[in-house]
Image (cartoon, rainbow, N blue to C red):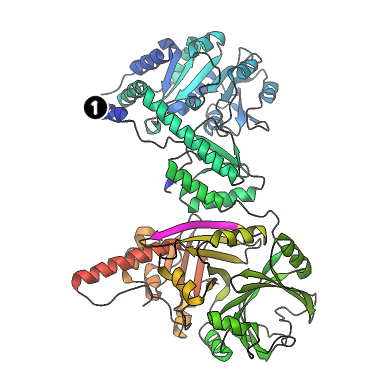
């Protein structure tokens, strides 16, 4: 991951003075540190205005908490803490053989202090309060806390975790010495990991009554912390002004990030820490958010079904968060009940297309070329393989809509037909949501059909088949045959790649989110040299319709997207991806049948193992067939593209095999580009002619 925002870390490296102190301390690494960290204890005591006997130091606040649990608890004691809380506390309960009593947070994402008070009993020996709270970032004022302290019996110790207190200095708390004097059973726990940015050095400390410290000290590991920690703490304390400047910068970025996310419609709890707590009413939306963040290189902490916690990073990381989550901002909560039925291609020569798809791609001819009753003069034929259905339509007169389509675009996908259980109701719903209607619902041959606009010159016909009507019936055509058991292993349509003119991506995504109820599942920007594109993937509820929507970064950026838009004459389907269970077998069969495929340069495969280790196929198998491989958080995918046989080069196909991967091979774009550049450089250095390209 590029942006590590899961651990609530300070985004800045060590302060220059701290770095210099550590370098100086390195010379003493051959010497043992103090048996007990007296110097570090004294440094912190002087800084906080307490006695040495009131300080416990250890390996981070987690290490100090460990020592506190070991020193204060006996097996069977009870520990009260919030749910959720800092992950370490339930673990420490188990290690101390104490009962973990988790009290849910209140509706305001703060400790439910009244509920916690009600759970105190004779076995309660430790009460953990995080202020500010981890993981929600909420706070209590000192007056609110002390009202709760008054309800706690002296037999229970209050552990007040203030790991993030430097981000909330205005809570009205007195100096620590005064707190300890007023509340003898109080322990204040702090760390140098957050505001001071020394997480890797693991330096924590607690301030407590001397009697509590005496109970804990025997449980501390000798010789820790050491001289590196001492040097870093002394330098960090001396650099207080610089630390406060960084706190201000992080707080500014936190509030900026929260504001942007709220504008996008996310529920973000007000935070007084260096992180944000993001919630959603629908747990599935959180899963989509997690996936979107991962695809943008952002590591976040997820609380399944509850929330996502995000540390505040630098501006680049925070902008990546905004970009990732903005792709989900307009998702409809009411998806339209449709599933993919078939696609219709307008073609100039139906016979040649039937021959190409049956011979090379293994499709069965389910309905031979036939005039379609009730429609303009046309010939249509239905082909099928696995769950894929392709309707080919050739116009026979100048007035047919396909004639104008073919004049503007050439052969191409003209209709992505969606099956509905009630086409009339779906049409009405889509129109109410803002869809452009092309034809109202009408009954034909036991079916109901209606049509709405999709993008460019592509439409969505809504098709309803009445009970008892044969599967795959196309109104106006003879009933189809059943597909055979042959084929080449193509199973379903995995996705459609759709090219859009500059400025149309956001509007198209919003239309599919708000009108069709599709979910946004992926979004990214790819920049390679002077080339670049933005892409967003939307998907219907049953995942049978997946659109990879792509637009160029600029009209002058060049590349295949700009070329497609110019040659096709606007928005359209660039390629259709077919899913295969075994891409090696499928592509091998298709190649033997004469299907031309794009060829990756040899350097791509030389460098493949630097990116991943193929799980399903060997590198040699991939290289022999020029198959590309990519991986994401969920698994791997393998893919290859056919060489376009379209006169304009604006329609081709993809074969893809997914081994649990959910993305679309974008890393291959970069890998291919780098491979081509390397191979070109090698040829230039040797004087060899030719340009390798990825489409040899």
Q: Of 110 and 102, which appears nearest the observer?
A: 110
The image shows residue 441 at horizontal and vertical percentages of 77, 73
**Residue at 36%, 65% in the rendered image:** 673
Res 457 visible = yes
The residue drawn where x is 66% and y is 17% is 122
Q: Is residue 527 magenta?
A: yes
Residue 141 on the magenta span:
no
The total number of labels drawn is: 1
Q: Residue furthest left?
A: 686
In what quadrant of the picture does the C terminus appear?
Answer: bottom left
Question: The residue tagged with tag 1: helix, strand or loop?
Answer: helix
Q: What x and y, as percent, mark residue 432? A: 74, 61
- 518 or 587: nearer the viewer: 518
Q: Which residue is mark 1?
A: 24
Q: Main secondary structure of the magenta part?
A: strand
Asked which quadrant contains residue 466, the reply is bottom right
For residue 446, which quarter of the picture? Answer: bottom right
Give the vertical position of 554 relative to 239 (above or below).
below
Q: Which residues are magenta?
A: 520-528
């Amino acid at each position: 991951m590029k942006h590590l925002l899961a651990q609530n870390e300070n985004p800045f490296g060590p302060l220059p003075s701290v770095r210099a102190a550590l370098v100086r301390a390195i010379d003493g690494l051959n010497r043992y540190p103090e048996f007990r960290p007296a110097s570090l204890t004294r440094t912190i005591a002087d800084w906080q205005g307490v006695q040495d006997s009131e300080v416990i130091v250890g390996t981070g606040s987690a290490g100090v908490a460990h020592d506190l649990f070991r020193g204060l608890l006996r097996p069977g004691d009870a520990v009260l803490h919030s749910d959720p809380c800092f992950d370490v506390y339930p673990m420490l309960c188990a290690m101390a053989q104490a009962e973990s009593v988790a009290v849910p947070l209140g509706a305001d994402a703060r400790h439910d202090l009244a509920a916690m008070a009600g759970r105190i009993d004779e076995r309660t020996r430790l009460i953990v309060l995080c202020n500010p709270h981890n993981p929600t970032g909420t706070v209590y004022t000192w007056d609110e806390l002390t009202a709760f302290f008054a309800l706690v019996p002296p037999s229970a110790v209050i552990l007040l975790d203030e790991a993030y207190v430097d981000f909330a200095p205005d809570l009205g708390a007195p100096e620590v010495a005064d707190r300890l004097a007023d509340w003898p059973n109080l322990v204040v726990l702090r760390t140098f990991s957050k505001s001071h940015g020394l997480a890797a050095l693991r330096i924590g400390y607690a301030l407590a009554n001397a009697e509590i410290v005496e109970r804990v000290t025997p449980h501390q590991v000798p010789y820790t912390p050491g001289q590196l920690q001492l040097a870093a703490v002394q330098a960090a304390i001396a650099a207080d002004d610089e630390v406060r400047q960084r706190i201000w910068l992080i707080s500014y970025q936190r509030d900026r990030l929260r504001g942007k996310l709220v504008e996008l419609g996310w529920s973000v709890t007000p935070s007084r820490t260096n992180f944000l707590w993001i919630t959603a009413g629908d747990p599935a939306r959180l899963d989509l958010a997690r996936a979107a963040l991962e695809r943008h290189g952002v590591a976040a902490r997820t609380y399944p079904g509850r929330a996502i916690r995000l540390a505040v990073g630098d501006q680049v990381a925070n902008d990546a968060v905004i970009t990732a989550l903005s792709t989900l901002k307009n998702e409809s909560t009411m998806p339209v009940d449709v599933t993919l039925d078939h696609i219709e291609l307008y073609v100039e020569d139906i016979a040649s297309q039937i021959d190409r798809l049956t011979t090379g791609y293994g499709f069965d001819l389910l309905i031979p070329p036939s005039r379609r009753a009730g429609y303009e003069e046309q010939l249509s034929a239905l082909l099928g393989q696995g769950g894929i259905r392709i309707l080919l339509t050739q116009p026979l007169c100048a007035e047919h809509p396909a004639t104008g389509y073919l004049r503007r675009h050439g052969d191409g996908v003209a209709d992505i037909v969606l099956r509905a259980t009630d086409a009339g109701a779906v049409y009405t719903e889509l129109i109410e949501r803002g869809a452009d209607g092309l034809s109202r619902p009408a009954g034909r041959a036991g079916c109901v059909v209606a049509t709405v606009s999709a993008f460019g010159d592509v439409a969505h016909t809504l098709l309803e088949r009445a009970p008892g009507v044969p599967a795959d019936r196309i109104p106006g055509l003879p009933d189809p045959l059943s597909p055979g058991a042959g084929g080449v292993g193509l199973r379903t349509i995995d996705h459609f790649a759709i090219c859009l003119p500059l400025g149309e991506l956001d509007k198209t995504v919003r239309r599919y989110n708000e009108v069709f109820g599709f979910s946004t599942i992926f979004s990214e920007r790819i920049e390679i040299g002077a080339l670049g594109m933005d892409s967003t993937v939307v998907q219907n509820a049953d995942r049978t319709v997946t659109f990879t929507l792509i637009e160029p970064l600029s009209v002058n950026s060049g590349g295949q997207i700009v070329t497609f838009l110019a040659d096709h004459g606007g928005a359209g389907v660039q390629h259709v991806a077919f899913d295969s269970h075994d891409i090696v077998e499928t592509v091998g069969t298709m190649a033997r049948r004469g299907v031309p495929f794009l060829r990756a340069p040899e350097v791509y495969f030389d460098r493949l193992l630097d990116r991943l280790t193929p799980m399903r196929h060997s590198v040699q198998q991939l290289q022999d067939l020029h198959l590309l491989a990519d991986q994401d958080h969920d698994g791997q995918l393998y893919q290859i593209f056919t060489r376009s046989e379209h006169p304009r080069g604006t329609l081709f196909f993809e074969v893809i095999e997914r081994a649990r991967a959910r993305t679309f091979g974008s890393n291959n774009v970069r890998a291919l580009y780098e491979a081509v550049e390397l191979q070109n450089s090698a040829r230039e250095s040797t004087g060899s002619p030719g340009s390798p390209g990825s489409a040899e």
